[in-house]
Amino acid sequence: MIVTKPRDWARIKANLESIDAKSVFLMGCGQCATVAHTGGEKELAVAKARLEADGYQVTGWAVGEVACHLGGTKLETRKHFGSVDAADAVVVLACGAGVQTVADAVKKPVFPGLESAFLGTVLRSGVYEERCQTCGDCVLDLTAGICPVTTCPKGLLNGPCGGMWNGMCEVQTDRECTHVRIKRRLAEQGRSATRVIPAKDNSVKLKPGSINTRERKGQ
Ligand code: SF4
Ligand code: SF4
């Protein structure tokens, strides 16, 4: 999931002040931001109360199924057209993709209400760990399902580096070295840990990424 964290409230207020906004419509996301407890119904209620305490009128709020789905978000904002139209701005408690999708769906100034942190795993409720940088050339097949690009602070495909000490990472000293973990898990699975992973093909990392599965259907 996309892990988000609350954005500095002063920045949100500064955004609203920059357009002299007096009224706000709030949007959340029913997927990642709800799971992360940053942009679900509860968090929107808190944001609403906070905005009202700061003197803003909150014209309405909505938590759609998934904020980054353009069709769904257009539908959701149409359902709340009157409240969106009555607002000077829309504040979105979702990841950056969700914010941009809402900005495509409405004609009002749209501001982020969260910071997008990373693509990660929920280790347990409220504890998240970054697991993927969407590099487009995955090596998890060679690394026993542990991403060295993301979980080694140096992003080394092969390791350990010379700084590893007693199995621990030299950069994040409270964490086991990624490459020690990879080698151990490969060995546990009876797989060779000696293979050198070739340099990644960074040309597949072209930004902005785009995929059109409709085009593939005719192939
Ligand atoms: S190698 Fe790591 S960063 Fe790249 S796609 Fe796989 S999990 Fe994501
Ligand atoms: S000790 Fe291991 S995890 Fe840490 S930077 Fe070096 S190779 Fe990466």
Image (cartoon, helix red, strand yellow):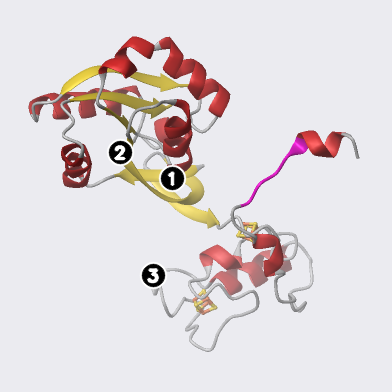
Outermost right residue: 219
The residue that disc 3 covers is 174
How dense is the environment of label 2, judged by Cα within 10 Å: few (below 14), some, or many (20 and up)?
many
Q: Nearer the viewer, mark 1 or mark 2?
A: 2
Percent x, y of residue 24: 24, 25
Q: Nearer the viewer, mark 2 or mark 3?
A: 2
Q: Is residue 208 above or below residue 190?
A: above
Residue 148 horizontal side relative to residue 119, left or right:
right
The answer to whether residue 65 shows anywhere in this view is no
Outermost bottom residue: 162
Q: Amino acid at mark 1?
A: Val
* Numbered mark located on residue 3 in the image: 1
**Mark sitting earlier along the chain (2/3):** 2
**Mark sitting earlier along the chain (1/2):** 1
Label 3: element kind:
loop
How dense is the environment of label 3, judged by Cα within 10 Å: few (below 14), some, or many (20 and up)?
few
**Mark sitting earlier along the chain (1/3):** 1
Q: Give the extent of the magenta segment.
A: 209-213
